[in-house]
Image (cartoon, rainbow, N blue to C red):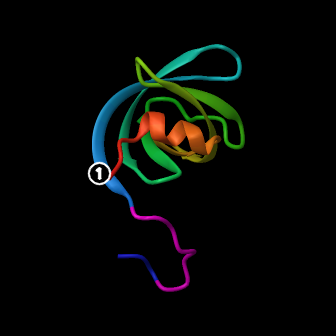
Amino acid sequence: MRVPGWIAREEREPVSVGATIVLPDGRSVSVRIRDVSANGCCVESQEVLPVAQTVRLDLGSNSVEAEVRWALAGAAGLRLMDERSRAKVWPPR
């Protein structure tokens, strides 16, 4: 349940999917996607991801650009950059 006064957000769907994030410097970081929404996802990571940077989210057969919207030790929120990419990454609900 969201606390009153917080900004409204899209519904999240819990998942557990392994993926890789390619950082702007070219390094790859293994992540686990833990929830998805229409516009992005939350990932678990051993590395603090660079906030406000564009990264490539690689899911094996598909990859898309995403912006790191927030990051803490162990987790980060990504926003997919292109609406057409969303259909490639998240299956229809």
Q: Please tell me how many numbered marks the rendered image carries.
A: 1
Residue to which mark 1 is pinned: 14
Name which quarter of the figure residue 53 lies in.
Answer: top right
Res. 33 in view: yes
User: Residue 32: within the magenta?
Assistant: no
User: Residue 6: within the magenta?
Assistant: yes
Picture residue at 56% right of the left edge, 30% below the top: 64
Q: Position of residue 84 (x, y in %)?
A: 57, 40
Picture residue at 59% right of the left edge, 34% below the top: 49
Picture residue at 45% right of the left edge, 46% below the top: 42
The reply, left or right, for residue 42 in relation to residue 92 is right
Res. 80 in view: no
Most foreground residue, 89 or 18: 89
Q: Position of residue 23 (x, y in %)?
A: 63, 23
Most foreground residue, 36 or 84: 84
Picture residue at 28% right of the left edge, 38% below the top: 16
Does residue 40 sit above or below 20 in this rendering? below
The reply, left or right, for residue 92 in relation to residue 50 is left
- The N terminus, quarter of image: bottom left
Please state the extent of the stretch shown in magenta in the rendering. Answer: 4-11
Q: Position of residue 33 (x, y in %)?
A: 38, 38
